[in-house]
Image (cartoon, rainbow, N blue to C red):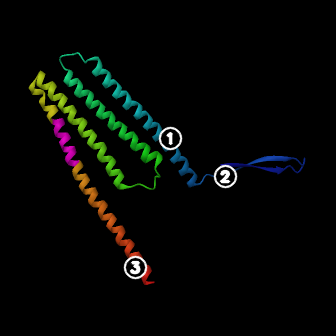
Amino acid sequence: MSGIRHSVNPKTGTFVPVTIYKPLNMVDIKKVTELLFTVVYLIAAFVLVCLSIAIMGFSIHEVIVNFNQEHGFVSLMLQSVGAIIISAAILDVAQYMVEEEVLMNKELRNPEEARKTITKILVIISIAVSIEGLVYIFKAGIKDLTLLVYPSLLIMVSAFLVISLGIYQKLSVVIERAEKENVVVKKEEAEEMTFKE
């Protein structure tokens, strides 16, 4: 930060501009970095939206081009559905970035909103993994039954992800309730102290 002041030259009696530099304080640096990261998050979200739309468009194009194909159309459809679900997850991530990192005040974060966003993204990912497993099960059923190990593992991973998400949900709800009760108790204690005085 700088400012320009004028000083009088004693020999000539004319005004001479003098630049005075003011050092940046931590508040200014924090504002600049927050603005920088907000712009970066906005650009990243825009790129994610563009990639998601491209994935959807490519998936729809593949289905339309191969519509009359007799063999493998079902697996192509399932792959397209999986790709569109993944692109929906990408859109959710972009939406989260815009809502949480660009539009929202950084100090006013709500754990419940973060839990809901994480839940939504993980559900979409587990659905995409399950569909990918189904696609490979169809392919293995047509080609070779010994190839069923990989799709079975994918479906097991998806099931494990859903179970883990349920445990996370249960634990985070319990912690949120305990924190809310703790805040209410502290508030009541503060009111009692004020009343006694």
Q: Residue at x 56, y 54 (%)?
A: 27
Task: State the residue position of label 2.
Answer: 22
* 1 or 3: tag closer to the N-terminus: 1
10 Å crowding of disc 1: few (<14), some (14-19), many (20+): some
Which callout, 1 or 3, points to the residue nearer the camera? 3
Where residue 116 appears, x then y in whole percent? 32, 49
Q: How far apart are the alpha carbons under marks 1 and 3? A: 47 Å
Picture quadrant where residue 140 is located: top left
Residue 192, which numbered label? Answer: 3
Report x, y in % for residue 68.
23, 15
Badge 3 crowding class, 10 Å Cα cut-off, few under 14, some 14 to 19, many 20 or more, is: few
Residue that extends furthest to the bottom in the rendered view of this protein: 196
Q: Which residue is mark 1?
A: 39
Residue for point 35% across, 69% down: 184
Amino acid on which the number 1 mark rests in the picture: Val
Q: Give the vertical position of 124 relative to 116 (above or below).
A: above
| Cα–Cα span, label 2 and label 1 | 26 Å
Inspect the magenta stretch and tell me whether residue 150 lies in it: no
> What amino acid is at disc 3?
Glu
